[in-house]
Amino acid sequence: MEKVRLSDTLIMDRIIHGHWRLMDWKMTREELLHFTEEVMDLGITTVDTADIYGGFSCEEAFGDALKLKKGLREKLTIVTKCGIVFPCENRPQYETHHYDNSRKHIIQSAERSLKNFGTDYLDLLLIHRPSPFMDPAEVSEAFRQLYDSGKVRNFGVSNYESTKFEMLSSYTEYPLVTNQVEISPLHLDVFQDGTMDHLMTRGLYPMAWSPMAGGELFTGDSQRVKNVRSTLLSIGEKYGETRLDTLAFAFLTSHPGKILPIVGSGKIDRIKNAMDALKIQFTQEEWLSVYKASIGKNLP
Amino acid sequence: MEKVRLSDTLIMDRIIHGHWRLMDWKMTREELLHFTEEVMDLGITTVDTADIYGGFSCEEAFGDALKLKKGLREKLTIVTKCGIVFPCENRPQYETHHYDNSRKHIIQSAERSLKNFGTDYLDLLLIHRPSPFMDPAEVSEAFRQLYDSGKVRNFGVSNYESTKFEMLSSYTEYPLVTNQVEISPLHLDVFQDGTMDHLMTRGLYPMAWSPMAGGELFTGDSQRVKNVRSTLLSIGEKYGETRLDTLAFAFLTSHPGKILPIVGSGKIDRIKNAMDALKIQFTQEEWLSVYKASIGKNLP
Amino acid sequence: MEKVRLSDTLIMDRIIHGHWRLMDWKMTREELLHFTEEVMDLGITTVDTADIYGGFSCEEAFGDALKLKKGLREKLTIVTKCGIVFPCENRPQYETHHYDNSRKHIIQSAERSLKNFGTDYLDLLLIHRPSPFMDPAEVSEAFRQLYDSGKVRNFGVSNYESTKFEMLSSYTEYPLVTNQVEISPLHLDVFQDGTMDHLMTRGLYPMAWSPMAGGELFTGDSQRVKNVRSTLLSIGEKYGETRLDTLAFAFLTSHPGKILPIVGSGKIDRIKNAMDALKIQFTQEEWLSVYKASIGKNLP
């Protein structure tokens, strides 16, 4: 598996395993351990999750599996997130869905993540959403405390506009090592709103969530989705590749911005499909033909 | 009254008194003097006005009051603006409403402001609106002449996009110390278009005009305004605060970007209501609940 | 003719002659030589073209004329572009209209331009369109090879958003000396989306294509176009100028951003009309009146 260096203390896989829907996989802790080891055997040791996934339950479920095997956590690069809260069974104390970017909440959430995973450090902690009410001094102070105590080794953001990225960067002494954003053949915003330009200017690599557009790429029956699907499959013919997910991942990994897609599946074949994307490099014409099919018009 | 330092030579109040509607107050010069002293006794000594307010008449009306009492002006921090012109009784020479950001106009307007106030310096002069035809070299030269002659001590802008702010900044040797923009619970653009991020990145504090949305917050009967109003009042219950204006000002002053709201009232009670906002600090959840009520949807 | 310095090795005319529609002029090579010399006698020695103009035929047609007269090319400043490809008689190998910003294509296109013109250097090469798939490292490497071999003396871009301009700038060791963009009284985007602010911040001068909006300024019969036209002509009365094109060019050349308009005509009178714009300097009120007529509303 191709590796990418994001900082002195952070090397990530080019394809990352995502736990967003881990609870849907309905695995026992033993099954999850086994699956995790299968994924690791394929070469993927970077895991992306978040405090809120599964209604604040995925981190703990994964931690329960990790605890079955001593030394496993050290072989993994764990990315998690904080900053969103909402009322649910595991968080009855909240009344509304909102963001909490206070120093106190960031630290408490990170510490709870550590406990969930049964570890004493996180490789990367992301602020999950940009908040119009964020106090960058508080976030920076939380980062400092978490870094100094060794609890978090690297920091980043997710879904950030470039202006907010620059704003937080100007307040914190720790580099923001990535911006995890939505990218798929059906979700091209980052190529149009300056986000990708900004990351490339900074020499940063985005992590990409929902690279299959939450499944819509497979199941959508709008003309737009059909066009994107047929364009991808038609390109695949040249490479002898008929797997739609492999081709969609190749759309992401072919981009010069070194996009790190997250494959959020509990099936080992899906993980393999994603990894095989790295064998394909779209030409300029091929990549742009997918782009044009998705925006529904020609380029000027 | 909390004070905020904007430059070596500029300290402003956290809440600023605004003269936009001074002519509507129908005060004699003696009444205006008395009212000004009442406001000053409350601790507010920063006054925001503009050459154009009241059809180019507010500055002079205020100056007439100031001239009644020797030494009063020196106790005040006076902010005024220039760059907009339009035909009216006081400016029959103009044919159309337009912007004039020429060196000559900026200097003439500032000098007329000095005369209006009966003073020999302005604490802060703002370019009132970004013009697509602004020549930054001319503006910069006007600033230099006004600064060197001691006529203006600080410069800033109003209603500027961040790109134009950066552009003008790159041409002038004087720091732009603020950007006066519209902010209210009903006007959230600055949180969405990067303006607030830009100011926070630069470590600058915005002055906020129309913090009550020109009264719409009180009188609007759309569902949106009703929702914002009831959300503010519901938060107020927690703090034992029933005054809508106090709560709306608290929405602004609670923000970490250190917003300096302008209270544009001729009634001393309204000024007090604004000042009492500083006793309330909204939580992240409270602030975002107002934000959500205003945008009419949940956050992602 | 006023000259503008864009780099140590690049001086351009304030008004540039454009070859976009050269094939429509239906000139023999002798006629084109004669016309080119006429334009040069007027003082315009900067020519703007592109590999794709005339279906990949304009460069060669111009080169055929140049080859008739030894020493002529050295008196000219030649600007051309690359990066767009599409299927046509001269490029049957392409299947779709797309962008190719690969190192290989940029170098090949520039070398073919050299051959077309019968020269061994280009004064300025522009990347024709921003591509969402551009690899800035490849573009930069192409620039390096073309510069080191003496084949291209200066580089720039066309139609670039400021974020992509900054991104490419951060990768290449050669300054991007201009951004050629669409500007006309009917096309004001650059004044509204930050592009002009960005160029002025960087101290760069835009080349302006379609300054007459592709002729729509003359022929359009919408109320908007009529308003813009009558506003221009009404301003012209003050200057004793009745030529609409002269007035539209004056709208561009009056702007403090030092816009370099491209006049794309094969008629010498049209060139003279454009040049005469430099005798007129719109006032702030005049310029903004055209702007307001075009956006169809007053300024705030």
Image (cartoon, coloured by chain):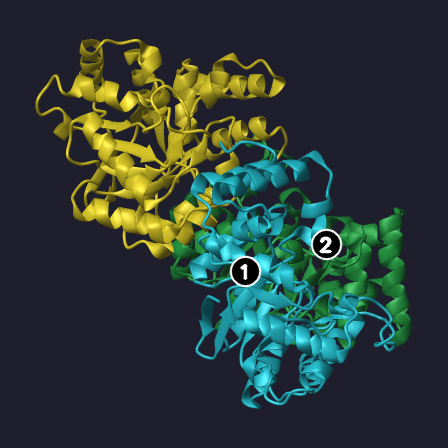
Chain colours: A cyan, B green, C yellow
Quarter of the image for residue C106 reads top left
Residue appearing at x 23%, y 9% in the figure: C28
Q: Most extreme residue toward the left, as rendered?
A: C70
> Could you tell me which residue is drawn at 18 percent across and 40 percent down?
C151
Badge 1 sits on which subunit? Answer: A
Farthest residue, direction front: A240
Instruction: Kindly tell me whether residue B271 is visible in this rendering.
Output: no
Q: Residue B174: percent from the left, percent from the top?
A: 42, 61
Disc nearest the viewer among 2 and 1: 1
Q: Are marks 2 and 1 in contact (CB under 8 Å)?
A: no
Give the secondary structure at mark 2.
loop
Q: Is residue C146 left or right of residue A19?
A: left
Q: Position of residue C18 (x, y in %)?
A: 32, 24
**Residue pointed to by mark 2:** B210
Q: Amino acid at mark 2?
A: Ser
Above or below B292: residue A222: above
Q: Residue at x 32, y 17 (%)?
A: C22
Alpha-carbon span between mark 2 and mark 1 = 55 Å
Please give the label number shown on residue A46. none
C146 left or right, relative to A231: left
Q: Is there any visible trace of residue A158 in the rendered image?
A: yes
Mark 1 crowd level (few <14, some 14–19, many ≥20, 10 Å Cα) = many
Callout 1, which amino acid?
Met
Quarter holding the N terminus of chain C is top left
Q: Is residue B26 above or below residue C86?
A: below
Residue identified by numbered label 1: A275
Crowd rating for badge 2 (residues with CA inside 10 Å; few <14, some 14–19, many 20+):
many
Q: Quadrant of the C terminus of chain C?
A: top right
Q: Position of residue C43 (x, y in %)?
A: 20, 24
